[in-house]
Image: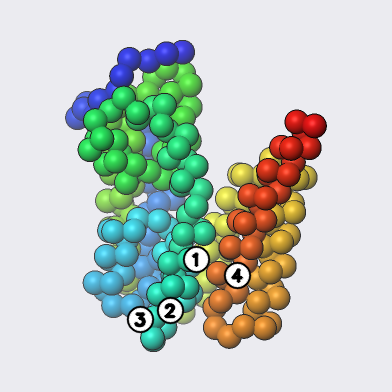
Amino acid sequence: MSQAPLTLTWRGALDGARISWALVPGVFAYGVGFGVLARTAETGLAAAFLMSALIFTGSGQVVALQLWQSPFPILAMLATVFAMNARYVLMSASLRPVLGSMPAGQAYLSLFMLGDGNWIMAMRMHAEGKLQGGFLFGSGATQYLVWCGGTLLGYLLGNLVGSPKSLGLDFLLTAFCTAMAVAMWRGRDDAWPFLVGGGSAILAAKLLPGQWYIVVGALAGSIFGAFWKRHRARQAAA
């Protein structure tokens, strides 16, 4: 169904905030968990808050904490966070037909607020012809404020929690990645990139010092997945 060109309006943003309210409890819990983990990693309150305010990506921030040490492995952090969040490149590209008619400033502001949950909602609403121009911004801004607030609360109350392991927060990244893997699973062909990434990470953990296994596993799985998808597409075409 075709739609008229979209524009960001306050009414659309408010509707986006209202419709996406179901996502808030999960985002808040994740934000609190990140804040607790950040306190355990001794990042400092300002650094933890700025990570949430400027980066705004749960999985990437949690991975960065795994690499948090002195001196900071900047290149390793950048490579790991990019690999963890490479899906946003494809997600943003899929929104080109939706946001392409919007002024550039409004489109990029909406994309900054892009998350897994409101992307799924936006694509479904677009398919139904019900998407408003302010939906991504309004829904994302709600999650953004909750995420930053959860980070602050988790960091400030982290001393009351004690060890993150007591609440299973050390399992936070593993649980998130597992949930994402299940959601993105499309069939047996997807097993190979997962196996290559996991096997590379296990091998790197035995051979390399520190947390480099995260970088190696993420890059190996991503690169192999790109080549594997192209290979399967060529086979199907033949």
Distance, label 4 to label 3, CA atoms, is 25 Å
**Category of crowding for the residue at label 2, using alpha-carbon neighbours closer than 10 angstroms: few (below 14), some (14–19), many (at least 20):** some
The residue where tag 1 is placed is 80
Mark 3 vs 2: CB contact within 8 A: no
Going by the numbered disc 2, the residue's amino acid type is Pro
Q: Is residue 198 left or right of residue 92?
A: right
State which mark lies toward you, 3 or 1. Answer: 1
Mark 1 vs 2: CB contact within 8 A: no
The residue where tag 2 is placed is 73
Distance, label 1 to label 4, CA atoms, is 8 Å
Residue 212 at x, y percent in the picture: 56, 76
Of pointers 3 and 2, the one earlier in the residue sequence: 3
For the C terminus, the quadrant is top right
Residue 10 at x, y percent in the picture: 19, 30
Specify the label residue 42 is tagged with: 3
Distance, label 3 to label 2, CA atoms, is 16 Å
**Category of crowding for the residue at label 3, using alpha-carbon neighbours closer than 10 angstroms: few (below 14), some (14–19), many (at least 20):** some
